[in-house]
Amino acid sequence: MKNILLPTDFSENSWNAIKYAIQLFENEPCNFYVLHVNKVTDNFMDGAPFLADEDLLLEVYTKPTKKKLRQIMKRISAHFPPNKDHKFYTLSDYNFFIDTIRKQVDEKRIDLIIMGTKGTSGLKEIIVGSNTGDVITKVKCNTLVVPEQAEFKPLKEIAFPTDFSLNYNLELLEPISDIIDQQKAALRIIHVHKKKMDLNNEQKLNRELLDDYFNGTEHSFHYLTNSRIEDAIECFVQSRHVDLISMVAKNLNYFQQILFHSRVEEISYHTETPFLVLHEK
């Protein structure tokens, strides 16, 4: 059974990520943990320092948060038919956001974090730091980032950008393989380089490893030439109607250029296409 963490700030884009998660794993047994994290001082005028007692926290923080979490549970029940394979739990905490995420990942043995971003402006925030940006860079847990405009549909095409510089741990690739099997999707492995050149021996070996690992599933290799990696990915995603982009976090060259660049307003995949970011455990 998968354990999935769903951080929420009670916004519509976080609700969109919750909907996407439930639909993506419709046919798989899952424990869904809906989590809200808040800084205690955010509930007080001007964030003035104070010593919080239990009664104060209960009235100002705990009760309102639990009420909103119950509303999410009701919304889920109203939006989706009962599913005996899905169990939902609500969690709340007042702490630093990343510390709480790490704690829950460890305690609940979370397999995947699924959280939303708010369109282009949300991804601009990733560049300078945001909750979503912090999670995918600072928490060693696979994370699915769902843009505000992303709507779930059965996955047909999954893009996997790589420069073939990594000798992939096969365990790292399991989440992609699981989604491919469950969704009957095709994997498109993309290599972008600034000018046309042959792969070196190490890259060829890593390419063969990927080819062997995904043997038996529909997959193909695509070699693109463009001075900007994000432009090449944008063109590929649009032309192939890619439903999901998956990347390895430690492949920093590709990871940073595709997600963390200053031209997000020109790149539509930031607002429409979910990203699955894979971490080594």
Image: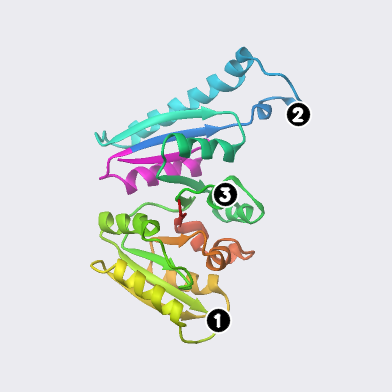
**Residue stretch in magenta:** 1-30
Q: Is residue 5 magenta?
A: yes
User: Looking at the rendering, which quadrant does residue 43 occupy?
Assistant: top right
User: Looking at the rendering, which quadrant does residue 180 occupy?
Assistant: bottom left
Callout 3, which amino acid? Lys
> In the rendered image, which residue does mark 1 sit on?
194
Circle 3 — which element? helix
- Name the quarter where the N terminus is drawn: top left
> In the rendered image, which residue does mark 3 sit on?
138
Residue depicted at 50% across the width and 87% down the height: 196
Mark positioned earlier in the residue sequence (2 or 3): 2
Q: Nearer the viewer, residue 91 or 75?
A: 91
Distance from the alpha carbon under mark 1 to that under mark 3: 29 Å
Residue 91, compared with residue 200, is above or below; it is: above
**Residue 269: horizontal and vertical position, in percent?**
49, 62
> In the rendered image, which residue does mark 2 sit on?
46
Residue depicted at 46% across the width and 70% down the height: 162
**The furthest residue to the top:** 55
User: Looking at the rendering, which quadrant does residue 127 occupy?
Assistant: bottom right
Q: Nearer the viewer, mark 2 or mark 3?
A: 3
**Residue 58: horizontal and vertical position, in percent?**
57, 16
Callout 2, which amino acid? Asp
Q: Nearer the viewer, residue 18 or 199?
A: 199
